[in-house]
Image (tube, rainbow, N blue to C red):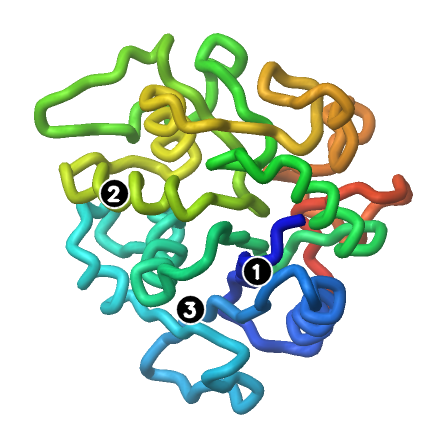
Amino acid sequence: MITNQVFLLLTNNICPTTISLFTELSACTEGLGKSKFLYHHQPTKDLPPFLNQANSFIFTDDSLCKLGYFLLDKKPMPVNGHFPLLDFFLNNPKYDHYWIIEDDVRFTGSWTYFFEACSELEHADLLTSQIRHFHEEPGWNWWSSMKHPTYDVPYEKRLKSFNPIYRVSNKGLRFLCDMLAMQWKGHHEVLIATLFHLYDLQLLDFGGNGHFVKPGFENRFYTNEYAECTVRYRPVMQEAGSLQNKLYHPVKFST
């Protein structure tokens, strides 16, 4: 059982809905690791009083730019979505595994059940959803974002993942920091999966029906079935669906 891990709820909106989700995550992960808000703060606004040193890690656009990595866009967020995790990791390098959970992810069961099941996949350096080869989803918009001043990765060797909720190992984050220091850049959903795969770090999918799904996890925590695709980019859902023990995204509750 993995216990030296951290669960980071990524948000820029501290409201009753996100506080409720954080409270649920904290209760369900007790004994499995630490839970913290990974909060994107705009310095022109006051910090929400709910946040404190124990329950949060606060980052800004400036703090992300100071990492020194090549930006894919003028602003670090949202396309450089791995930067907040790396900022946290560089300041907190002690954990074996690092979870990111976006604030519009919901699970129709006990989070304890989900995270304990994922502990069975402890050797994965990247544990996420919808890992795909280029030929499986050639129309995706971000394939071409992966760049380096000198090296090139042919499209047929590129992978993508979908990362509204994902886990990265300590080894994987150290590797990713090294790669970004070597001037790699790109949308995190192609950059991380492709570089990990090229350098033989282990990728696993916790559901769906793709090549990277371990036997026994097929459609376990989300389904790719067209009529009930539970983890997707769009359209937005007003509430989580009816399937039990499934992740749903994006769920935008009104506040």
**Disc 1: which residue:** 7
Kind of residue indicated by mark 1: Phe
What residue is drawn where x is 66% and y is 33%? Answer: 206
Whole-percent x and y of residue 134?
Answer: 44, 14
Kind of residue indicated by mark 3: His
Residue 40's label in the rendered image is 3
What residue is drawn where x is 67% and y is 41%? Answer: 118
Whole-percent x and y of residue 171?
Answer: 38, 42
What is the crowding at mark 2: few (fewer than 14 residues within 10 Å), some, or many (at least 20)?
A: some
Q: Pointer 2 and pointer 1: residues touching (CB < 8 Å)?
A: no
What is the crowding at mark 1: few (fewer than 14 residues within 10 Å), some, or many (at least 20)?
A: many
Label 2 vs 1, first from the N-terminus:
1
What is the crowding at mark 3: few (fewer than 14 residues within 10 Å), some, or many (at least 20)?
A: some
| Element at label 2 | loop
Q: CA distance from mark 3 to mark 1?
A: 16 Å
| Element at label 3 | strand
What residue is drawn where x is 22% and y is 41%? Answer: 178
Q: Is residue 250 visible?
A: yes
**Disc 2: which residue:** 72
What residue is drawn where x is 32% and y is 23%? Answer: 199
User: In the picture provided, is 198 more to the left or to the right than 238?
Assistant: left
| Element at label 1 | strand
Label 3 vs 1, first from the N-terminus:
1
Residue 37's label in the rendered image is none
User: In the picture provided, is 135 more to the left or to the right than 209?
Assistant: left
Q: Nearer the viewer, mark 3 or mark 1?
A: 1
Q: Nearer the viewer, mark 2 or mark 1?
A: 1
